């Protein structure tokens, strides 16, 4: 049987605001997501993360679930404002203690923690000071935060992920306004936010290495496989622009120390303020790249996306409840492409998963579409390993159904169902399937 390597990391991923709840407990400061979620009209059904999956109180039960599912890795994020309620300055020991207990619990269960420093819940105090990521000195705030947490947890946490999906929080948070902080502005603001995020990443890397003996440092990018709808030069160029914006705008500075020239010309009027030394800092050598992968998209020349002049073409492949195409080959293709074009030392799939309209039937959730999905995507990952991609682990999004941002609780991604009324956790068929796949190290 074709199998994954013995030391492969099998995990699930979560994020603080999506699961923790306890937003006013133990000194946690407010974040841009608390503010945004409590702004009428922003979130489906008026949902918010005040309680979410109550993971802050149920983390031991959640670790036991991971153990029961044979998982040996867990990617989670720290809520910056639990540790520094004002974003900077006084440290809230109770916040650090929560994560310290969580880390100890994971290690005792034989689960390797992968810590994400920033998964979108910026302390509100930092947003109020110069619009958060739009202010260049946020880089110093972020580095100081990275310093505090890596000193506190670095004796036990070796795997660090600086950012989650800067493309998403810069574009959806600052151009489209559909995510916190809900800014709808011109592309120069988006690109400034993205530049500051990349710079914060680059400047934090040496700090993490200095504080953490044996540090394994990476970052996580949202990538899409973008393909042209036809061979026509116009569509091929449109696909290149889309790819430039979603993928290369982030990967090129990280691995090549430059923004992609073709897009820089398209964006000439909107370029962020780049200071001498920025691009060198952003290119700090990494131990791994985290790939969050959900979608292939087919594009043609068009006007759906202003400034970049492309439109999406809907394919007739099956789709998830989010209307995202199901296409395991696309995972294989993006891994091969990243390996070929950027050659990261190691790659982890730090998120991959699907939402479906799950139904609780007694004590069971028969989520056959998610089982099929995982089987197909695991097989694609295995093919990539066999083709020489240095893929070291796969984190399914997500352990639990959780607060899916603007969609609230209406979209379920978990391999474990959460009955929000009672907070009961019910392992779905997909959870059982994943446990079996891990045991046999094969799809
Ligand atoms: O829930 C999100 C996660 O926070 C970031 N990546 C995509 C997931 C599904 O939309």
Image (tube, rainbow, N blue to C red):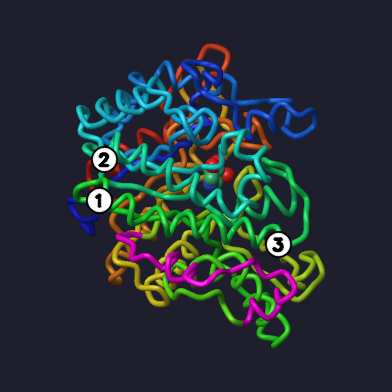
* Image location (x, y in percent) of residue 186: 77, 60
* Image location (x, y in percent) of residue 279: 48, 70
| Circle 1 residues within 10 Å: few <14, some 14–19, many ≥20 | some
Judge: label 1 CB < 8 Å from ligand 1: no
Reading the image, the residue beneath label 3 is 314
| Mark 1 residue element | loop
Q: Quadrant of residue 311?
A: bottom right
Residue placed most toward the observer, 75 or 388: 75
Reading the image, the residue beneath label 1 is 215
| The magenta segment | 262-288
Reading the image, the residue beneath label 2 is 154
CA distance for labels 1 and 3 = 43 Å
Residue placed most toward the observer, 259 or 322: 259
Which residue shows up at 64% across the image and 77% down it?
Answer: 264
Q: Which mark is residue 94?
A: none
CA distance for labels 1 and 2 = 8 Å
């Amino acid at each position: 049987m074709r199998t994954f390597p013995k030391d492969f990391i099998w995990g699930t991923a979560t994020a603080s605001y999506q699961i923790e709840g306890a937003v006013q407990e133990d000194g946690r400061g407010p974040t841009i997501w608390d503010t945004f979620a409590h702004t009428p009209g922003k979130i489906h059904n008026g949902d918010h993360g005040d309680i979410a999956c109550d993971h802050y109180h149920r983390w031991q039960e959640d670790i036991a679930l991971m153990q029961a599912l044979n998982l040996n890795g867990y990617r989670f994020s720290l809520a910056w404002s639990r540790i520094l309620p004002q974003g900077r300055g006084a440290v809230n020991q109770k916040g650090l203690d929560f994560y310290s207990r969580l880390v100890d619990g994971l290690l005792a269960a034989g689960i390797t923690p992968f810590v994400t420093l920033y998964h979108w819940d910026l302390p509100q105090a930092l947003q109020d000071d110069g619009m958060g990521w739009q202010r260049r000195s946020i880089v110093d705030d972020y580095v100081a935060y990275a310093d505090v947490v890596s000193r506190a947890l670095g004796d036990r946490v070796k795997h660090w992920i600086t950012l989650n999906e800067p493309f998403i929080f810069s574009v959806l948070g600052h151009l489209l306004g559909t995510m916190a902080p809900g800014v709808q502005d011109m592309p120069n603001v988006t690109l400034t936010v993205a530049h500051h995020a990349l710079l914060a990443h680059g400047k934090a890397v040496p700090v993490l290495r200095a504080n953490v003996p044996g540090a394994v440092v990476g970052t996580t990018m949202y990538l899409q496989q973008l393909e042209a709808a036809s061979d026509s030069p116009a569509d091929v160029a449109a696909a290149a622009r889309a790819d430039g914006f979603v993928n290369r705008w982030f990967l090129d500075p990280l691995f090549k120390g430059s923004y992609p020239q073709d897009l820089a010309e398209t964006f000439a009027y909107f370029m962020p303020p780049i200071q001498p030394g920025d691009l060198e800092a952003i290119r700090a050598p990494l131990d791994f790249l985290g790939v969050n992968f959900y979608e292939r998209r087919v594009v043609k020349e068009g006007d759906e996306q202003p400034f970049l002049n492309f439109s999406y073409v809907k394919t007739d492949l099956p789709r998830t409840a989010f209307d995202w195409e199901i296409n395991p080959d696309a995972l294989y293709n993006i891994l091969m492409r990243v390996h070929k074009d950027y050659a990261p030392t190691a790659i982890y799939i730090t998120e991959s998963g699907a939402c479906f309209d799950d139904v609780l039937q007694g004590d069971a959730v028969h989520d056959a579409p998610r089982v099929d999905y995982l089987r197909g995507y695991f097989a694609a990952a295995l093919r990539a390993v066999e083709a020489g991609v240095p893929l070291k682990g796969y984190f399914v999004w997500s352990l639990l159904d959780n607060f899916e941002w603007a969609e609230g609780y209406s979209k379920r991604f978990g391999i474990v169902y959460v009955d929000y009324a009672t907070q009961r956790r019910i392992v779905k068929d997909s959870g059982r399937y994943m446990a079996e796949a891990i045991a046999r190290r094969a799809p």
